[in-house]
């Protein structure tokens, strides 16, 4: 089944074990923009399929816009994380920011592809539901506006900086 952003408004329900595959599918379908909002940098964003799809999008065009907004990165800093390493290698293409304390939301987990594609796993890592949709109106544009507002208030995490000696 093809997955083309903007073409089909069919809501696909995924199981928890299919979450990484669904997020990777959305990232592969993006032409230019992927905005990802997660409560923590964890196994979902470190999955090989997801990181490979994000990398492919990031290097596809110099105009690619990949943003990852997260609340907590402690486990990722402690144990390492493939997405952090990729963002360090492609800093002009992949941006990571941490939300302000007041903007933290442990229920928020979604990805927006080209402003209309949507992956949503509310309550991750124990989601109530996981959905994927190539053309999710009006929800995706509304989440994109909220994401942009949070992004403007967010900042870079000092723990994610690479120390070069």
Image (cartoon, helix red, strand yellow):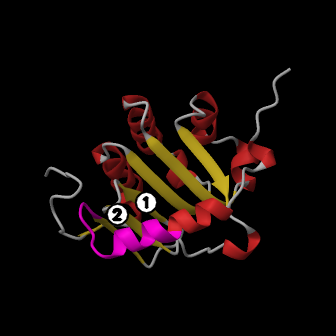
Residues at marks 2 and 1, CA–CA distance in whole angstroms:
6 Å
- Which residue lies under the disc numbered 1? 111
Question: Do we see residue 130 in this rendering?
Answer: no
**Foreground of the two, 134 or 41:** 134
**Mark 2 surroundings within 10 Å by alpha-carbon count, few (fewer than 14), some (14 through 19), many (20 or more):** many
Does residue 141 show up magenta in the picture? Answer: yes
* Image-quadrant location for residue 131: bottom left
The structure residue drawn at horizontal position 55% and vertical position 76%, both measured from the top left corner, is 107
Instruction: Please state the horizontal and vertical placement of residue 109, each as a whole percent of the image.
Output: 50, 67
**Foreground of the two, 138 or 73:** 138
The structure residue drawn at horizontal position 44% and vertical position 79%, both measured from the top left corner, is 128
Q: Which residues are magenta?
A: 133-146
Q: Name the element at disc 1.
A: strand
Question: Do we see residue 137 in this rendering?
Answer: yes
Q: Which comes sooner in the sequence, label 2 or label 1?
A: 1
Q: Is residue 124 above or below residue 25?
A: below
Numbered mark located on residue 118 in the image: 2
Instruction: Please state the horizontal and vertical placement of residue 46, each as a whole percent of the image.
Output: 54, 46
Q: Is residue 54 above or below residue 147?
A: above
**Foreground of the two, 93 or 70:** 93
Q: Is residue 6 above or below residue 56?
A: below
Judged from this view, the residue extending furthest toward the right is 165
Instruction: Please state the horizontal and vertical placement of residue 115, each as a whole percent of the image.
Output: 35, 59
In this rendering, would 146 be left or right of 22? right
The structure residue drawn at horizontal position 35% and vertical position 66%, both measured from the top left corner, is 15
Mark 1 and mark 2 in contact (Cβ < 8 Å)?
yes
Q: Is residue 163 above or below residue 36?
A: above
């Amino acid at each position: 089944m093809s997955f083309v952003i903007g073409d089909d408004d069919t809501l696909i329900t995924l199981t928890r074990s299919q979450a990484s595959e669904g997020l990777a599918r959305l990232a592969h379908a993006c032409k230019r923009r992927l905005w990802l909002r997660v409560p923590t940098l964890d196994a979902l964003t470190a999955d090989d399929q997801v990181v490979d799809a994000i990398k492919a999008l990031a290097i596809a065009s110099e105009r690619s816009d990949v943003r990852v907004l997260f609340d907590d990165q402690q486990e990722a800093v402690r144990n390492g994380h493939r997405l952090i390493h990729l963002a360090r290698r492609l800093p002009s293409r992949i941006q990571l920011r941490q939300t302000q304390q007041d903007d933290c939301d442990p229920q928020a987990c979604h990805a927006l592809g080209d402003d209309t594609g949507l992956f949503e796993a509310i309550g991750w890592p124990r989601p109530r539901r996981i959905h994927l949709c190539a053309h999710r109106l009006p929800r995706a544009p509304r989440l994109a506006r909220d994401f942009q507002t949070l992004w403007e208030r967010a900042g870079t995490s000092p723990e994610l900086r690479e120390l070069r000696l």
